[in-house]
Image (cartoon, rainbow, N blue to C red):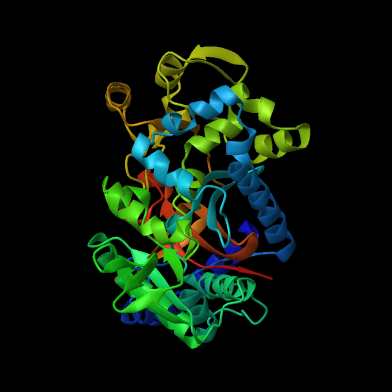
């Protein structure tokens, strides 16, 4: 895929005057339609990544296998490790009750892997499940690129994640033998934080309407429980599309418990059950990678883990670990080999709290480490994955810079089916988190 994209960047550079006009046309429509608008407008790459379909299928197969392993961890852990699971992953007793209420109800599960392509293969660095999948409106950018025709893109294909979400719900309606014309779907987020995403919620609502499905946008302040059923704005909700994260509720577990009453009575279908927060927890990568937990996996599973998952451990100061064949106390390893590691909160989103060793000086790194060890926030330490060199054009004020870019490849898996891709990129010289909040750009990924 890198070679194809290098060719596209070269074409962009050779035709730079027209390329800038093309970029401005596409970005202008992105702004008008408020695509990727989260308080501020997210910039875009107008040069996409293009994969061969065979490569896409291979990556998708690996992503699904890793997701299956993550989902099955609660059933694989020993009795002793299972008893410590929720505390180890940073959940309170009250949160554990919420998670266990929907545990193993994975119908219609929505997930996204985040991956970095190395010189020799690739590594999955995170798995986001539930609403944290993010970026599903990428199909809009894909369509604009194809419509413009700047590139010879007649044979480029893609799956639109938002349309695939609608397909998931149509399948659920059919499976439960519900009347599509009588079903009401609740798109539920947490107020007031949800307002920064309201445009994407409204787009989702319209996509459901286009398929003849009534959808209402709701939140914790405008729902009520009547006779064991969930109502919002005068409508009885049959299926709840949960978009809020467990962290969004800010400890208000009582309102979520109330929300679960119709579900536990069998009167409400919830897609993205509360428990799916477990599958997004970055501690899962320690369970997959750490030799302490290898008893859970057979030889074939260990091979795919070793190939696809970077070295990852729970951040425990005096833990003895083996890294590259040598034994270390974990905190001493991190001090000695700062540039090799990234620290991630187990329950962080949007790059919040992520610390990249290579991005800061030694003194600040050690200070940050000590602060984490003294805090109650639980962290993962993960080996930093270096992406292959790829030049991408950054257009600003009709000028172009061609920069070596760290690309994060996102693969959507909805209801265990490949459901689209996107890229997120940031110039390597920034040495920072590849996240929109830190200035990353969003971009398209097609396959041929």
User: Is 354 on the left-hand or right-hand side of 129?
Assistant: left
Asked if 168 appears above or below 440 in the picture, the reply is below
Residue 256, placed above or below residue 418: above
User: In the image, is 67 to the left or to the right of 265?
Assistant: right
Q: Is 218 drawn above or below residue 72 in the view shown?
A: below
Residue 195 location, x and y as percent?
26, 67
- Tell how many labels: 0
Q: Which of 190 and 49 is in front in this view?
A: 190
In which quadrant will I find the C terminus?
bottom right
What's the residue at 77%, 32% (across, down)?
Answer: 299
Residue 39 relative to residue 204: left or right: left
Which x, y percent locates residue 159? 60, 72
* Nearer the observer, 207 or 306: 207
| Residue 427 at least partly seen | yes
Q: Which quarter of the rendered picture does the N terminus lie within?
A: bottom right
Q: Where is residue 155 in the image (x, y as percent from the top left)?
A: 68, 78
The outermost residue toward the front is 227
Quadrant in the picture for residue 164: bottom right
| Residue occupying image coordinates x 60% and y 38% | 73
Q: Is residue 347 visible?
A: no
**Residue 229 left/right relative to 251:** right
Residue 340 x, y percent position in the rendering: 48, 29
Residue at (50% x, 85% y) in the render = 148
């Amino acid at each position: 895929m890198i070679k194809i994209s290098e060719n596209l960047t070269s074409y962009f550079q050779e035709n730079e005057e027209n390329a800038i006009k093309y970029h401005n046309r596409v970005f202008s429509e992105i702004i008008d339609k408020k695509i990727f608008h989260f308080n501020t407008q997210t910039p875009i790459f107008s040069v996409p990544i293009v994969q061969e379909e065979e490569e896409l299928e291979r990556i998708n197969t690996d992503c699904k296998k890793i997701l299956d392993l993550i989902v099955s961890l609660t059933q694989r852990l020993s009795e002793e490790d299972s008893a410590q699971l929720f505390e180890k992953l940073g959940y309170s007793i009250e949160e554990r009750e919420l998670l266990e209420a929907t545990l193993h109800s994975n119908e219609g599960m929505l997930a996204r892997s985040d991956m970095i392509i190395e010189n020799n293969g690739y590594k999955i660095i995170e798995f986001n499940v539930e609403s944290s999948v993010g970026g599903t409106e990428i199909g809009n950018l894909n369509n604009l690129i194809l419509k413009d025709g700047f590139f010879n893109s007649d044979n480029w294909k893609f799956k639109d994640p938002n349309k695939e979400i609608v397909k998931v719900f149509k399948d659920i309606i059919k499976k439960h033998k519900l009347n599509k014309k009588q079903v009401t779907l609740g798109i539920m987020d947490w107020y007031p934080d949800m307002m920064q995403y309201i445009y994407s919620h409204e787009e989702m609502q319209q996509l459901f309407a286009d398929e003849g499905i009534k959808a209402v946008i709701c939140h914790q302040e405008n729902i009520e429980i009547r006779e064991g059923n969930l109502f919002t704005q005068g409508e009885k909700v049959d299926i709840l599309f949960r978009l809020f994260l467990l962290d969004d509720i800010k400890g208000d577990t009582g309102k979520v418990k109330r929300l679960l009453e119709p579900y536990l009575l069998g009167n409400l279908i919830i897609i993205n059950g509360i428990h799916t927060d477990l599958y997004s927890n970055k501690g899962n990568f320690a369970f997959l990678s750490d030799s302490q937990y290898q008893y859970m996996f057979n030889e074939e599973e260990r091979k795919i883990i070793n190939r696809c998952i970077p070295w990852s451990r729970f951040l425990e100061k005096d833990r003895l670990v083996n890294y590259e064949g040598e034994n270390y106390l974990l905190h001493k390893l991190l001090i000695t080999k700062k540039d090799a590691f990234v620290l991630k909160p187990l329950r962080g989103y949007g790059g919040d709290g992520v610390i990249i060793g290579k991005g800061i000086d030694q003194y600040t790194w050690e200070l940050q480490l000590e602060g984490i060890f003294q805090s109650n926030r639980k962290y993962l330490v993960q080996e930093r994955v270096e992406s292959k060199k790829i030049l991408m054009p950054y257009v600003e004020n009709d000028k172009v810079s061609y920069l070596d870019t760290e690309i994060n490849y996102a693969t959507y898996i909805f209801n265990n089916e490949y459901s689209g891709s996107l890229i997120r990129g940031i110039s390597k010289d920034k040495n920072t988190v590849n996240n929109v909040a830190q200035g990353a750009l969003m971009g398209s990924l097609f396959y041929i």
